[in-house]
């Protein structure tokens, strides 16, 4: 992923923990309103425009307000566990590049369950 400036600590840490799961040319951005920012990772598969194979892909990570509020106050070990849980959720995503009917936009809801010990 291409490095970018992410203002919120949890977005920055999660993006760095996911870096090797996405193509090297993927873009990562902070999107959404200030009180509830989200993380968006996007990339395009190769191919000629308007032909099969040239598809924009994206993952929208939506963070629960409690996660955004509590994360900066967690210990370093607890923060690592949160990132590990989001990484595990991301490993389960299915990017079926060969299926013309596959969804190219996936959503990961990061709720308060990632804060559990």
Image (cartoon, rainbow, N blue to C red):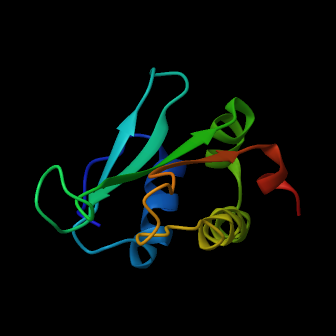
Residue farthest toward the right in the current orientation of the protein: 117
Q: Position of residue 95 (x, y in %)?
A: 49, 67
**In the displayed structure, would residue 95 be above or below residue 36?**
below
Q: Quadrant of residue 64?
A: top right
Relative side of 18 to 4, left or right: right
**In the displayed structure, would residue 36 be above or below residue 102?**
above
**In the displayed structure, would residue 98 be above or below residue 33?**
below
Q: Quadrant of residue 20?
A: bottom left
Relative side of 111 to 40, left or right: right
Q: Nearer the viewer, residue 9 or 91?
A: 91
Q: Nearer the viewer, residue 72 or 64?
A: 64
Tell me the residue at 41%/46% (across/down).
40
Tell me the residue at 49%/37% (across/down).
38
Q: Position of residue 43 (x, y in %)?
A: 28, 58
Q: Position of residue 99 (x, y in %)?
A: 47, 66
Dividing the image into 4 quarters, which one contains the C terminus? bottom right
């Amino acid at each position: 992923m291409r490095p970018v400036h992410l203002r919120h600590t949890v977005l920055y840490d999660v993006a760095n923990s996911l870096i090797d799961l996405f193509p090297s040319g993927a873009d990562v951005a902070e999107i959404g309103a200030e009180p509830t920012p989200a993380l968006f990772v996007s990339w395009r598969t190769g191919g000629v425009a308007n032909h099969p194979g040239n598809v924009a892909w994206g993952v929208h990570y939506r963070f629960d307000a409690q996660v955004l509020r509590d994360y900066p106050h967690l210990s370093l070990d607890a923060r690592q566990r949160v990132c590990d849980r989001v990484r595990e959720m991301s490993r389960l995503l299915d990017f079926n590049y060969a299926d013309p009917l596959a969804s190219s936009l996936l959503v990961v809801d990061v709720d308060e369950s990632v804060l559990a010990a």
